[in-house]
Image (cartoon, rainbow, N blue to C red):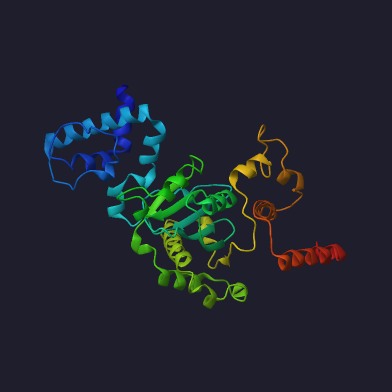
């Protein structure tokens, strides 16, 4: 084992390792690759014994990482392994949304672990456009709709309740991890931040005046899971705003939209790849349906086209309204 690599590993994960070392009176190595969060309740040890225990756990965790990189990466991803950091703050200190990005998108997902109904609340905020999308729906046991939404909006950061990660990692958290890119940060928020009343108040505060006719507050009062997700998402965003993000400070109001699941088609990720709807299977720079149709002039138009391909309308009234709008644009060139 390289001493320099081990030193770097200990430096990066010091608080996790120290917390794990302090959770046992013995100095023996852990016998299995269990998550650090699953150790027994802490009994304080100090001095040389704590340092020695920390080093032993570091060596064991390092070896496990080498043997099973996928498993270890899942356990050690961001705040998913950091219980110490969570005790100091409601959210982990990682603030990747502050950095420069083509599209910074936060996705907050709310669930009640061990609930057989698999009801999901979703709140997605695009920091570059000031748009918020809310959803509240019943999903399948393998969370097809959640995966579909992640595929559509391509979040750069995902926020889930701490109860989805401890005492055991929920099925939803596992499905999320294995259906997003390695660069996507998965963070946890305190359960008290997911509050439907706070979510309703936050939506009322940030809702733009010209969208109030489209999103009536009385129509989303019973969408409690979506409101819980909105509460945590906005609270998280406000904490980041305090760190001076130019993208987030540009919006005092948000364009909020509630998305139902009954009037759009659900296309699973395997079908999207097989039909090459947004990306060529053989060549990422090759032609796909999206690239073939894309003659848009703005990023917003490009995003809208992509969303329409991935979740096409199934409601006749909405389809006819769109066709009428196109006819109006074709008949009046001045509008283009």
Residue 162 horizontal/vertical position (percent)? 35, 54
Work out which residue is located at the far right of the displayed protein and give it. Answer: 331
Residue 77 lies, with reference to residue 60, above or below; the image says below
Residue 212 horizontal/vertical position (percent)? 59, 75
Residue found 49% across the figure and 70% down from its top: 203
Work out which residue is located at the far top of the displayed protein and give it. Answer: 1
Q: Nearer the viewer, residue 326 or 84?
A: 326
Residue 201 horizontal/vertical position (percent)? 45, 73
Residue found 52% across the figure and 56% down from its top: 246
Q: Nearer the viewer, residue 254 or 44?
A: 44
Residue 228 lies, with reference to residue 308, above or below; the image says below
Residue 211 lies, with reference to residue 60, above or below; the image says below
Q: Nearer the viewer, residue 101 or 126?
A: 126
Image quarter hosting the N terminus: top left
Is 9 left, or right, of 326 in this rendering?
left
Residue 11 horizontal/vertical position (percent)? 30, 35
Q: Can residue 76 be seen at all in this image of the molecule?
A: no
Image quarter hosting the C terminus: bottom right
Q: Can residue 157 be seen at all in this image of the molecule?
A: yes
Is 287 left, or right, of 251 in this rendering?
right
Numbered circles on residues, count: 0
Q: Nearer the viewer, residue 156 or 63?
A: 63
Residue found 34% across the figure and 55% down from its top: 163
């Amino acid at each position: 084992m390289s001493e320099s690599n081990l030193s770097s590993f200990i430096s990066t994960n010091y608080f996790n390792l120290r917390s794990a070392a302090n959770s046992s009176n013995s100095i023996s190595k852990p016998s299995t690759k269990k998550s650090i969060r699953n150790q027994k309740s802490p009994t304080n040890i100090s001095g040389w014994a704590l340092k020695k225990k920390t080093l032993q756990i570091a060596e064991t965790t390092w070896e496990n990482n080498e043997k099973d990189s996928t498993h270890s990466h899942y356990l050690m991803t961001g705040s998913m392994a950091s219980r110490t950091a969570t005790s100091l703050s409601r959210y982990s200190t990682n603030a990747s949304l502050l950095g420069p990005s083509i599209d910074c998108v936060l996705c907050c997902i709310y669930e009640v672990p061990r609930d057989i109904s698999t009801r999901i609340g979703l709140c997605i905020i695009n920091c570059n456009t000031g748009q918020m999308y809310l959803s509240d729906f019943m999903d399948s046991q393998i969370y097809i709709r959640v995966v579909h939404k992640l595929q559509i909006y391509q979040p750069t950061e995902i926020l889930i309740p701490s109860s989805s990660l401890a005492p055991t990692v929920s099925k939803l958290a596992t499905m999320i991890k294995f259906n997003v890119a390695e660069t996507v940060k998965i963070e946890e928020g305190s359960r008290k931040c997911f509050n439907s009343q706070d979510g309703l108040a936050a939506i009322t505060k940030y809702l733009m005046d010209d969208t109030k006719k489209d999103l009536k507050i009385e129509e989303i009062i019973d969408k409690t899971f979506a409101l819980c997700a909105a509460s945590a998402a906005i609270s998280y965003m406000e904490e980041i705003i305090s760190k001076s993000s130019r993208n987030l400070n540009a919006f005092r109001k948000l364009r909020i939209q509630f998305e139902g699941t009954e009037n759009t088609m659900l296309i699973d990720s395997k079908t999207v790849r097989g039909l090459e709807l947004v990306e060529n299977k053989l060549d990422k720079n090759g032609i796909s349906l999206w690239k073939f149709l894309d003659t848009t002039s703005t990023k917003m138009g490009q995003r809208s086209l992509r969303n329409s391909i991935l979740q096409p309308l199934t409601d006749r009234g909405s389809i006819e309204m769109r066709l009428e709008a196109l006819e109006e644009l074709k008949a009046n060139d001045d509008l283009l």
